[in-house]
Amino acid sequence: QVKLLESGGGSVQAGGSLRLSCAASEYSATNDVMAWFRSDQVKGREGVAAIVNTTGNPRTTYADSVQGRVTISQDSGTLYLQMDNLKPEDAAIYYCAAGWRGHNPYSVPPEVMLYETSYGYWGQGTQVTVSS
């Protein structure tokens, strides 16, 4: 059974940085898309960033709200999210997702990679708190 385990959440002041990690077990990131989502009580769950690298030429996509402030990456099957210049509105529970359910991830519109329904595996989440 695929398991995704997030870590790296915490409390920071606005302008600070955090690096989230997602370790996967019983799973191969090869030929799959992985993504970060976040959820809070106001906006619900939204896609933050996604990455696919099945050809050696990675494709990434980011939500407009985090563009330029976050970087998604993979290394040996572990997924990362580097978040800089954090804002209070970034506070949420961050989830790792995998198990792509869509068409060729290199040909779909980038926003499809941030659809919750595009993924079949989910982690339990890690809390990020940003104080102003």
Image (tube, helix red, strand yellow):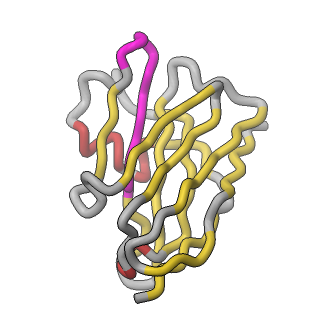
Q: Quadrant of residue 83?
A: bottom left
9 horizontally vs 115: left or right? right
3 horizontally vs 97: left or right? right
The residue sitting at 34% across, 41% down in the picture is: 113
The residue sitting at 48% across, 63% down in the picture is: 17
Placement of 119 over or under 33, stated as above or below? below
Placement of 103 over or under 50, stated as above or below? above
25 horizontally vs 119: left or right? right
| Residue that sits furthest to the bottom in the current view | 132
Question: How many labels were placed on the picture?
Answer: 0
Placement of 44 over or under 26, stated as above or below? below
Query: Which of 56/38 is in front?
Result: 56
91 horizontally vs 121: left or right? left
The residue sitting at 64% across, 59% down in the picture is: 8
The residue sitting at 26% across, 52% down in the picture is: 68
**Residue 112, image x and y in percent?**
29, 42
Q: Give the range drawn in magenta.
A: 47-57
Q: In which quarter of the image is residue 126?
A: bottom right
**Residue 94, image x and y in percent?**
54, 63
Q: Which quarter of the rendering shows the C terminus?
A: bottom left
Query: Which of 16/7 is in front?
Result: 16
| Residue that sits furthest to the top in the current view | 55
Q: Is residue 98 magenta?
A: no
**Residue 85, image x and y in percent?**
36, 66
Q: Is residue 51 magenta?
A: yes
**Residue 84, image x and y in percent?**
40, 60
Q: Which quarter of the rendering shows the N terminus?
A: top right
Query: Which of 59/27 is in front?
Result: 59
